[in-house]
Image (spheres, rainbow, N blue to C red):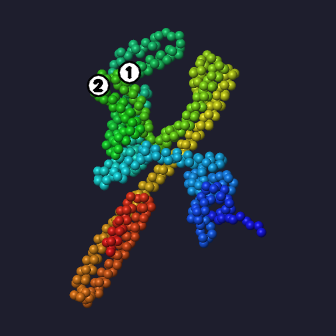
Amino acid sequence: MHTFPQTVVFNVGGTMFETYKSTLHSLPHSPLADDSFLRKHFRQEKGHYFFDRDPDVFCAILNYLRTGELHLPTKCCGPAVKTELEFWGIEEDEIEECCWTNYNSWTTTLDALRRLEQDRKVNMPGSQDDWPEVERSHSKVRELQIKFWNILHNPRSSLLANLYGYVSLTFVIISIFSFVAQTHEFFRVPSHHKAANLGSKATHPITHNTSSANVTAEAVVLNRQNITKGLTEVHPVLLGMDGACLVFFIAEFACRFFLSPRKLKMLAMPTTVIDLLALLPDIIEFSIRIFRHEKGQSTVDVITNMRLLRTFRIFRLMRHFPGLWILFYTLKASLRELLLLLLFVFVGMIFFASLIHYADDQTVFTSIPTACWWAVITMTTVGYGDMYPTTRWGYVVGTLTAICGVLVVGFTVPVLVNNFILYYQHTQCAFSRDRATKRRAHVNKQRRQCLEKRAQGLHERVPEVQMSVLKCFQNHHTANGQPGPSCNETCRSNKKTKKTVSQSVEDGTALLEDEAELSTRQNDATSSDTADLAKLLKLRVT
């Protein structure tokens, strides 16, 4: 008589699996080959082994024991698969190459998002918790300090903070507009200062005889710019706008510094350094204009050139537009891809610049370094047109340069785009999760206050009923404790009141216990206080 091999039945997460016992021993070091491990999960009454694990991953592991190839289900998350593999004693390097890419992408993405979340909470304005619970006191001064700090630092904390964010954004836009407009002749007025010493220096360039029309044209342009710069000055309205912006930014910086819970950490933040760099030239320039007047005009011109640092103020927009911060973070996180892109461009630049220098007219492409400019402009498909091939072989090299440039950019740029989309979507989800957490904390706080108020009212009524019963006992009972003739009506009324209060106390205690259990599940810091309040109420009733 033919005997079949012995089989075993597994119930994994409600899904039944049956296999030969010899299959389990195909991997000797696996827990499935350990009889002592299996006995801990054996159900005697049902005759199978039960494991409260993921059945999809177990199915892949069982197939691995049968065939020797570990293929993973595509719908399972990488970290979850890793946890299951560790439980069943399977090394992750046993995963087949066709599934390894998907598995590794899950792990890589998770690590990248964890780094993003950590960086977002530390550096992104309005995301970090600047006031830990240990530093929060119940004093009015500290509460006001926290409130004003959130208004200045976190535009999403309240409606008032959002309004102030728009005001700050308006001043940033005005400051940048003033800086740009001061260089245009429309926003300049005739200067009140004499420019007698300007004429000879400014007019000499146009009197020279030159053989080149280009040099003459450049001299005329430079001469005109010098005359305009010397005979005009910035419109007073723009100066007033600069002064108003300077006062606002100084006041804002001072308030942020004095309200900050960690002043040294605030000074080391990149946004603070940018604010200081943008403020410093304006402060020096206005100080010279106020205290030195005309004597400091040459110094003012030097400081005016330093006002280029004001353009750094545009980075303040990161407080109001998270996408801008995500863009800079993407560039930082994708540094390896950027270096790879630069390497491809550098190799193509050297190669095609050398080809075009020898294949085309060397009076146009005078040297390989000069041709590098043409190669970069052509590979990036910009094409200024200042240099272009004119020979047959030059056209061939130019065509190959453009095609290779499109391929290089097309291979590397999508990686940066995908990273930006991933980080941006995660940040938006994080903001939504933070808002939901704040709403839940607010609801829990209101519920706790309501329960405390109700418990306080119940505490006040319990002594009242006890005194009423005692008074009834003293007034209407005889000396031996028997009820008197007028006691029935009063005692019935007091007993009814006591029963009502006791029932209300029991209801309040149950609510407090539910609140304590909910707070414990949510890791709420008030859970112990709520549980203590429920215990105190029980003792009071007793």
Q: Position of residue 235 (x, y in %)?
A: 37, 29
| Left or right, 206 with reference to 237 | right
Mark 1 Cα shell of 10 Å, populated few (<14), some (14-19), many (≥20): some
Residue drawn at (37%, 41%) of the image: 265
Say which amino acid is labelled 1.
Answer: Leu
Residue drawn at (60%, 53%) of the image: 90
Q: Mark 1: which secondary structure?
A: helix
| Residue 434 in sight here | yes
Work out whether residue 383 or residue 186 is closer to the camera in this orientation and state it.
383
Q: Name the residue that disc number 1 marks.
A: 231
Q: Name the residue that disc number 2 marks.
A: 292
Sequence-first disc among 2 and 1: 1
Q: Position of residue 167 (x, y in %)?
A: 39, 43
Residue drawn at (28%, 77%) of the image: 466
Between circles 2 and 1, the one closer to the viewer is: 2
In the image, residue 512 sits, relative to residue 127, either above or below, namely below
Q: Position of residue 3 (x, y in %)?
A: 74, 67
